[in-house]
Image (cartoon, rainbow, N blue to C red):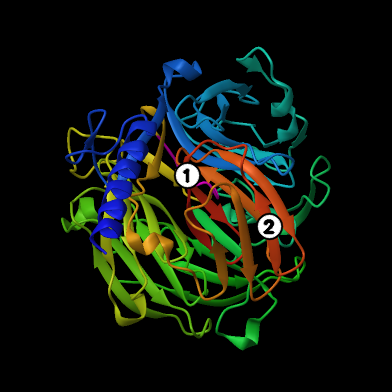
Amino acid sequence: MKSYITKICVLFGLLQFSTMMIAQTPCTGNMAGGFPCEGYDLQDRLTTAEMDSSFANDSWGWTDPEDGTEYALIGLTNGTAFVDISDPTNVIYLGKLPTHTGNSTWRDIKVYQNHAFVVSEASGHGMQVFDLTQLRDVTNPPVTFSETAHYDGFGNAHNIVINVDSGYAYGVGTQTFSGGPHFINIQDPTNPIGEGGYAANSYSHDAQVVTYNGPDADYTGREILIGSNENEIAIVDITDKNNPVEISTSSYPNIGYTHQGWFTEDQRYFLLGDEIDEINVGFNTRTIVFDLEDLDNPQLHLEYEGTNSSTDHNGYVVGNLYYLASYRAGMRVIDISDIANQNMTEIGYFDTVPSSDNVGTTGLWNVYPFFESGNIVLSGNNGFTLVKQNEALSVTSFEVSNETSMFPNPSSGIIDINASASIGAVTIYNTMGQVVHKTGSNTNHIQVDLTHLQTGLYFVKTNNSTQKLLLK
């Protein structure tokens, strides 16, 4: 028994050391490369100068469906930068799609069907469409790209929203429809078609649009927009583009500027950021949570105050985590697993503006946390930063999930995966977030040969689980 425990302890120590050595700049003593942090390692960075610009703003991401390569899409004053992050500790700036007209502090990007859709507040900019599959063929970066198509149904826009389920894009903050959502059919991405808009709730600064599958059965399957409209949220049924219908509006105390929000994955709660309230009132970073069990009757559920006084910008939900870009406090990661009981807890951060956590509207603009690899894109004034949650191996890492089992673990290279349902895609990542092997099965059992991989720690992702695997 003593020998077994000794082996486990040695194995644990070696794997921790190996993981630390692979990460470019681990978060140690709450610092990584000069940036305050907790739980998140620094992968790599690009300054605005390295992307031939003076300012960075918003961001999004694209994963190539052919080979799993991940790309960061970074908004700049003078265009949109494309960054290959397949080697996350040695990212490659592939080039830029120049702005359609003039430069602007504001640029926004979303992705649908392997195309990027880009808007800006630059006068006459419209919506650029860019075929992202061109990024596969870049051999001598950086490249100056050309737009694939263009939509001129509006000029300037503050933001672009896409519902990938319906194939519609929504320009918000344009000079059309009183600044409300401008409907664009992008089901044929290079042939965008305007289909009207919605003006009844005036200007939308940002919005989220979903094909609704939440707790209010009255709206199941409907296309629902939640607009962050400066002084309120507006919930609108936009299923019929010729006849959008307001469902409800809602407000909250101490309004500064109703800026941006995101649904929890069960579509029960909506987490809203107000961009100016910390400046006007003086409390710590505030997230307003609405209970939308009944879309016709939103209820203010919770006002969460963060750990510092920084002004918040954009926030997104993945599973039970809320990733918030807070201008001068960087990315804050908040556990919302107990949100029903009005509990939210910050569990990690990566501060891209070390000098101050005070209020103000310069610093980190956006966080993109949706890559399967776990790499997280941060963008803002000083450029692009790539981070990832650090992974410390523990004995519980070898526990098998109820839905999916994997054995043997540790393994010499051949593993068997069994699941209660079809396994689907199986993706193997190394500790840097790189995809090193992909396969799949339409059955509930698959044997995977990984003998071509080096010994070390890996992560095995299936449709039902992500588990750590040790190759010895």
Q: Identify the residue shown where x is 55% and y is 84%.
A: 215
Residue drawn where x is 73% and y is 42% of the image: 114
Which of the numbered marks, if any, corresponds to residue 447? 2
Q: Which residue is mark 1?
A: 472
Q: Nearer the viewer, residue 112 or 200?
A: 112
Magenta-tinted stretch: 371-379
Mark 2 or 1 closer to N-term?
2
Residue drawn at the location 56% of the way across and 31% of the way down: 122
> Within the magenta stretch, is there residue 378?
yes
Quarter location, residue 78: top right
Question: From this viewpoint, is residue 36 visible?
Answer: yes
Badge 1 marks a residue whose secondary structure is loop
Residue 63: x and y in percent read 64, 42
10 Å neighbourhood of mark 1: few (<14), some, or many (≥20)? few
Q: Is residue 39 left or right of residue 314?
A: left
Residue 192 highlighted magenta (yes or no): no
Find residue 297 and report its horizontal and vertical position in percent.
Answer: 47, 85
Comparing labels 2 and 1, the label whose residue is closer to the camera: 1
Q: Is residue 351 left or right of residue 299?
A: left
Q: Nearer the viewer, residue 242 or 88?
A: 88
Kind of residue at disc 1: Lys
Is residue 344 positioned above or below 2 on the image?
below
Give, as a three-letter code, the residue at label 2. Answer: Gln
The quadrant of the image that shows the N terminus is bottom left
Gap in Å between the C-alphas at discs 2 and 1?
17 Å
